[in-house]
């Protein structure tokens, strides 16, 4: 079914107006459209730059009964990568 949707999207993309193309692309790339499909624990890492982009997804996932947690780390979008990886490794070790 997903392959059929992707093929339809490609065919649609070739003939669609730019606005419609962006709308279709958004439905495939927006994680909010797939909250009910989450099947594993989800950890969303956020830096200190004040962009609370993960909050709506975390709230929707929790409302759907999914294991979802926001993890705050130091740094901005680029600086937060190393601390995020360290926290993720710690979390994986706890799962054993």
Image (cartoon, helix red, strand yellow):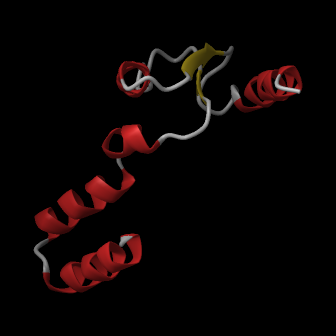
9 or 80, nearer to the observer = 9
Q: Quadrant of residue 81?
A: top right
Whether 30 is drawn above or below 50: the answer is below
Q: Quadrant of the N terminus?
A: bottom left
Residue at position x 28%, y 54% from top?
A: 26
Q: In the rendering, at what x and y percent does residue 28 appear?
A: 34, 58
Count of all numbered marks drawn on residues in the image:
0
Q: In the rendering, at what x and y percent does residue 2 appear?
A: 38, 70
Q: In the rendering, at what x and y percent does residue 20 appear?
A: 13, 65
Q: Quadrant of residue 91?
A: top right
Q: In the rendering, at what x and y percent does residue 77 appear?
A: 59, 30
Whether 63 is drawn above or below 38: the answer is above
78 or 21, nearer to the observer = 21
Q: Quadrant of the C terminus?
A: top right
Residue at position x 30%, y 73% from top?
A: 5
Residue at position x 82%, y 29% from top?
A: 92
Left or right of 44 on screen, residue 15: left
Residue at position x 23%, y 78% from top?
A: 13
């Amino acid at each position: 079914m997903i392959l059929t949707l992707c093929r339809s999207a490609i065919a649609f993309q070739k003939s669609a107006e730019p606005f419609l193309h962006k709308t279709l692309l958004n439905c495939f790339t927006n994680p909010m459209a797939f909250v009910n499909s989450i099947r594993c624990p989800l950890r969303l890492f956020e830096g200190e730059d004040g962009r609370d982009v993960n909050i709506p997804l975390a709230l929707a996932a929790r409302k759907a009964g999914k294991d979802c947690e926001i993890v705050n780390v130091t740094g901005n979008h680029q600086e937060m990568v190393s601390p995020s990886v360290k926290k993720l490794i710690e979390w994986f070790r706890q799962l054993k």
